[in-house]
Image: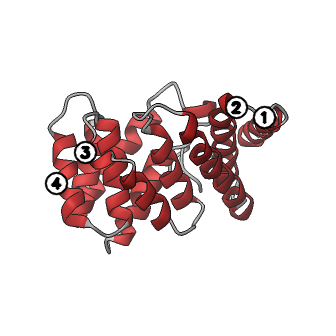
Amino acid sequence: MAFEEDFERERARYEDGMARPAPEQLVRTGNAAYGAGLALLMLGRTREAADWLERAALRWRESWEHATPTSWGRPIGVVKATLLAGGDAGPAAEWALALGSAEAESPIGRYAATLALLVLDRAEEAAGLAATLVAREDFPPAVADALAAIAAADPAATEGAIERVLESFETRDEYLEDVAVADTVLVLRLLALRRGLSPAGRPSPVLPG
């Protein structure tokens, strides 16, 4: 019931934002569409989820025109949403890199670039950027370790790092749009599969059954 309620709330937020077209509504509607998509994934309604995740990617990409040059959360969201929707994330990844994310000073920008490089199977470059994230104190260490392990195609390290990311989701109090889903874990598992890895994972209340 909780995820049904989450979906209905996010759908209402999306429809409200779309009824008031303005640049400042684009991120809001993107967030709402993403939350709706995640809730539907948890409900096992994968085809509907894909539609909402694609809407999220579209709204976030449209919002970039009105963003500051360091609004890296938007290309991150576009790449993640496209991956979770089961679409071709290559164009989204190319776009994220074209924005200069690989040269960003901020760890969030480099995170965007690392995701993009892994999508594009440019593992050596991804490994180099992931190493800079591992070395930082202002970026989640488990996520950095997972990216580095996936780039290196290290199955044991990947399994362990993704487990730590999952634990961080299970123990947090706040989620994007208040939808309790470990979306980063889902994305990391998809990227691992692209590298020929098969992280087993385990059941969790913040992952689809």
Q: Residue 165: image x %, image y %?
A: 36, 43
**Residue with the mark numbered 4:** 128
Marks 2 and 3 sit apart, C-alpha to C-alpha, by: 29 Å
Q: Quadrant of residue 14?
A: top right
Q: Amino acid at mark 2?
A: Gln
Q: Residue 40: image x %, image y %?
A: 70, 51
Task: Check whether the beta carbons of the residues at disc 1 and disc 2 lie within 8 A of each other.
Answer: yes
Q: Which mark is residue 25?
A: 2
Q: Residue at x 18, y 64 (%)?
A: 124
Q: Residues within 10 Å of mark 3 (few under 14, many from 20)?
A: few
Task: Check whether the beta carbons of the residues at disc 4 and disc 1 lie within 8 A of each other.
Answer: no
Q: Considering depth in this image, is 159 or 26 the residue closer to the camera?
A: 26
Q: Secondary structure at mark 1?
A: loop
**Residue with the mark numbered 1:** 21
Q: Considering depth in this image, is 95 or 202 the residue closer to the camera?
A: 95
Q: Is residue 2 above or below residue 119?
A: above
Task: Check whether the beta carbons of the residues at disc 1 and disc 3 lie within 8 A of each other.
Answer: no
Marks 1 and 3 sit apart, C-alpha to C-alpha, by: 33 Å
Q: Secondary structure at mark 3?
A: helix
**Residue with the mark numbered 3:** 103
Of tags 4 and 1, the one toward the viewer is 1
| Picture quarter with the N terminus | top right
Report if residue 100 is visible in the image. Answer: yes
Q: Considering depth in this image, is 203 or 30 the residue closer to the camera?
A: 30
